[in-house]
Image (cartoon, grey):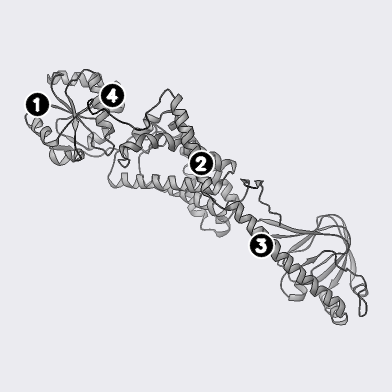
Amino acid sequence: MAQTNGPGAEDKGGGLKLEQVGREVSVPSGTCIVRQGEPPNHFYVIKSGRLRVFRETADGIRTDLTELGPGDYFGEVALVTGQPRTASVEAVEDSHLFQVSKEEFDFVLDNNPQLARHIIQQLAHWLVTGDRRLEREVVREAKLRKVSWFDYALMIGLSIVFALVFNLYNDNQIPLIQTWDKDEVTEISLTEARKLYQENAAIFVDARKNGFYEQRHIREALNLPVVFFDLMYPMFEFMLAQKENPKEQPVIAYGGVISRRFDLELARALKDKGFEKVRVFGGDSYRDWPRVFPVVEGQVKKPGHMPLGVAGLIEWLPVSIFLLILIPPVRRSPYLSAFCRVLLGVIFIQFALSKIMRPAVFALNVVDYGMMPAWGVNLWALILPWAELLVGLFLILGIRTRAAATLIGGMNIIFIVGLVNALYYNLPISCGCVGEAGEPVTWWKVLKNTGMLVMAAQIFFYDRLFVLDRGGFVWRERKI
């Protein structure tokens, strides 16, 4: 290795001296004198000039160790141990060196015990100093790369604050928790509703989207999707007129999803239109209507594909990550991490912006999955898009990237579970990625999000370029 402030070719007192062997060489600036991993052939003493000692990993991460000047020497570690060069040395400026071959170096040491003792002392000093320097770097890296609860609290807290403030001033504002006045919507038991059905004394209206209605509905029930209420209500009135059913007749709205959002909202909308006897299924068994009433089942029709723009196209790129992770140098590459950060950031930012502007539409998409309780739908619809936006920005800017990658991974796991659940129950829904737009739920969609999950994991383990961490902005060509 290299030594600083060494004796160079000076007299050691007694025995053969270095200047009695070897030869002088001149090296221009930028010349690599020895390379890491090469077999040792020479020992060098610097007579003039300046040299840099560095190490470099297989994936191109360079670590500068020290700089050497006149009187310093290098190359003794490999010659003494017989091992390949432990570092590379290049000339920073035009330099003049005293070059001693391995045979000459061994001969001088054999005939100059004082020089041998001095080199041994310098080697010991270098090893101790290197251990301390390595320890400091490890501690520093551990502190800089440590993921703390503060990182998660920062991102989630900002998401909540921005969501609440924006919703307060948004023209499309929604309540934090959807509630209904018990006096506003009257409940009816399934037994009483079945009796009215058998007597043909009530109008049954399915509040769900058309795909769910065609998949399964109560026989003779009409379909009035609450999401298209204003558009479809005139047709609904016409159908009632054809049936000669007056508004005074009981109307029973049903939806049968975990949040009860569709049937309750439809019941309230019908009351606003003058229907006096609007009911919804009550009790904990309101979702059991398929076992109580005669139902009509049809073939499931997947919703049409709607383009997702740039984000929809680049969503396919994560699939290629499956191939890249099979190549170890690529899998560990910090440049791949930087690419993954930008890619995920762009995808999640674009998806977030459309949902932020229309939280009510996104809330109905959340309801479609049938996994969120009523009290959590609006909160999820408000906070999640802001979390996607902030985490995407943090990834692109290199702020708290490991924590951001963890949150991205968590979002993808939740979404993958929702997609698999929708596929298992054959739900006729779109992904709901961009508000009203989306693509049908398929296993391809699951594969895309699994690719994003892999990208988040790669960022968590190997990201170290262009990072704004607790020590400031770091271009991770690390100085030790």
Nearer the N terminus, badge 2 or badge 3? 3
Characterize the local packing of mark 4: few (<14), some (14-19) or many (20 or more) Cα atoms within 10 angstroms: some
The residue shown at (20%, 19%) is 237
Tag 4 residue: 229
Tag 2 residue: 155
- What amino acid does circle 2 point to? Met
Which disc, if any, is residue 135? 3
- What amino acid does circle 3 point to? Glu
Mark 4 or mark 3, whichever is nearer to me: 3
Characterize the local packing of mark 3: few (<14), some (14-19) or many (20 or more) Cα atoms within 10 angstroms: few
The quadrant holding residue 378 is: top left
Which disc, if any, is residue 201? 1
CB contact under 8 Å: marks 4 and 3: no
Nearer the N terminus, badge 3 or badge 1? 3
- Distance Cα–Cα, label 4 vs label 2: 37 Å
Q: Is residue 271 above or below residue 389?
A: above
Nearer the N terminus, badge 4 or badge 3? 3
Tell me the SS state at disc 4: helix
Please provide percent x and percent y for residue 399: 58, 43
The residue shown at (83%, 77%) is 116
Nearer the N terminus, badge 4 or badge 2? 2
